[in-house]
Amino acid sequence: MNLTFYLFFGFIALLLVVFVWSVGKPRRSGLPLTIENLLKGCEERHTAYMPQIRQALSEVDGRYLKEHCSQTTQRRVRRERDRISAAFLGALKNDFDNLLSLAQLIAKLSPQIAAMHEWERLRLTATFRLQFGLIRFQLWAGRMPLDQISRLSMVVSGLSMRVEGAIQELGERAAMAAELGSAVNRRGANFAE
Amino acid sequence: MARLGQLLWASNTAVTLALLVLLVRHKIFRRSPAFVLYTVTNLLQALVLYFIYRRWGYASTISWQVGWAMDLLTTMAKAIAVAELCRQLLGAYRGVWAFAWRTLVGSAVLVTLVSLITANHRWELLLPNVQRALELAMASVVVLLLVFVRYYEVETPAADRGLTTGICFYSCFVVLNDTLLERYLYSYAELWSVLGLLAFLASLLTWIWAFRKPMAAEASENIVVPAGFYGAVMPELNLRLQLLNEQLARFWRVGDTRP
């Protein structure tokens, strides 16, 4: 009896939380949601700047600083590295959000969608958001080893090269959809806001 | 308390009538016939109960039976209005709709069954339990619908936002109210009635606010990409998301290995 009582109240509380979340406006950067803008966002991938970030975080630089610079300079460099780590994370999130928006728009415009792909994307999004939050917290708490982040950036560069071909092909295919979208927009249906 | 209940009952009938006038004036019946039908059912319920209570009194068995029968009738009308709302918001996107309606129906059936199974199995609580299960299913469907709307960034007219808010609020309230009734039974019955009327009044006012202006005409055409496009592109997009996720996972594991 008691369990049922709390079960119903708990479920309603959960529904209300999700309701409030779902009626809120999603956080989105200024550009309107169109295939053209999303493709532009996908092309301007921030992870392309990984070699420069890797250089900034390199162990060699760290050792040099330790041997030749004052404590104050080392601290300043460390702060700078923290900032770069945060920027790197932000870049990953930006890439993820752009691709996610593109996928959502394509799903919206498609006459048929596969539940398997949709659930998979939902799972990936949930995992990404959770991990992102945890890592950001770690960075904030000062627990992130910068030398290892440097090694990670090498992995990122490698992956970027691997997916380059796939994205290029995706761009060509999506351009076809963009033409269709523009044609319909001209006829009055507006999906850009 | 009884006097307050009567006052609220009269107010609700008047406000329901005002809502119906507004819906007819703004020709909402063309766009949302099921919601108009739901409003008419509510009005009908008030009229029927008025005559029943006058003829047989509030505490008679026939009043109890007719009261619950009318409640279930309005709940069914509301369920049809919820289905109509889902279709209005997502129906324009064929692929998403095909995916969404199965999910929504599945979740509604699941929630109804779980709610009925976990309820207190006493015969006098049968009808409140059925009503609670249906209201809980509707609240879940509306919330899930809004999740779909947000996830796929579907444009929602202000009137539909008001409609979903009113439906969700009232359904959630009925579930809580019926749960309290199940626990405290007769000692809560009078308050149960008054609170239910108050919650319904709040929903009616939300709907009046939502439909205060005529609705803009909807775009009739939808953008559709070729049938094979989704199947060709989506696995690649998911793969890329997976890769970004893996990068993040490595980042996380790197952080984890620090002594």
Image (spheres, rainbow, N blue to C red):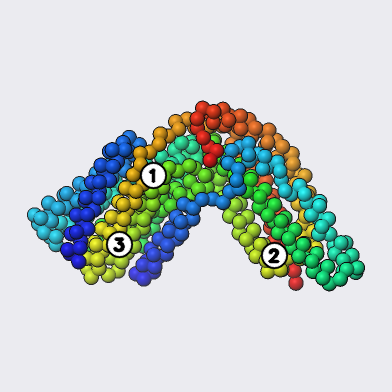
Give the residue type that dot 1 points to.
Ala
Relative height, residue B250 to residue A75 (above, below): above
Tags 3 and 2 in contact by the CB under 8 Å rule? no
Q: Could you say where residue B225 lies in the image, as x and y percent from the top left?
A: 56, 32
Q: Cα distance, mark 3 to mark 1?
A: 28 Å
User: SS class of the residue under badge 1?
Assistant: helix
Tags 3 and 1 in contact by the CB under 8 Å rule? no
Name the chain letter of the residue that bears numbered label 1. Answer: B
Q: Cα distance, mark 1 to mark 2?
A: 44 Å
**Nearer to us: label 3 or label 1:** 1
Q: Which mark is residue B159?
A: 1
In this orientation, which residue lies closer to the viewer: A61 or A11?
A61
Q: Could you say where residue A151 lies in the image, as x and y percent from the top left?
A: 80, 58
Relative height, residue B188 to residue A174 (above, below): below
- Crowd tier of the residue under label 3, counting other residues whose Cα lies within 10 Å: few below 14, some 14–19, many 20 or above: many
Q: Could you say where residue B95 lies in the image, as x and y percent from the top left?
A: 51, 37
- Residue highlighted by disc 3: B178
Left or right, B48 with respect to A78, comes to left
User: SS class of the residue under badge 2?
Assistant: helix
- Crowd tier of the residue under label 1, counting other residues whose Cα lies within 10 Å: few below 14, some 14–19, many 20 or above: some
Give the residue type that dot 3 points to.
Asp
Give the residue type that dot 2 points to.
Leu
Name the chain letter of the residue that bears numbered label 2. Answer: A
**Nearer to us: label 3 or label 2:** 2
Residue B64 can be seen, yes or no? yes
- Residue highlighted by disc 2: A139
Q: Residue at x 17, y 63 (%)?
A: B3
Left or right, B30 with respect to A78, comes to left
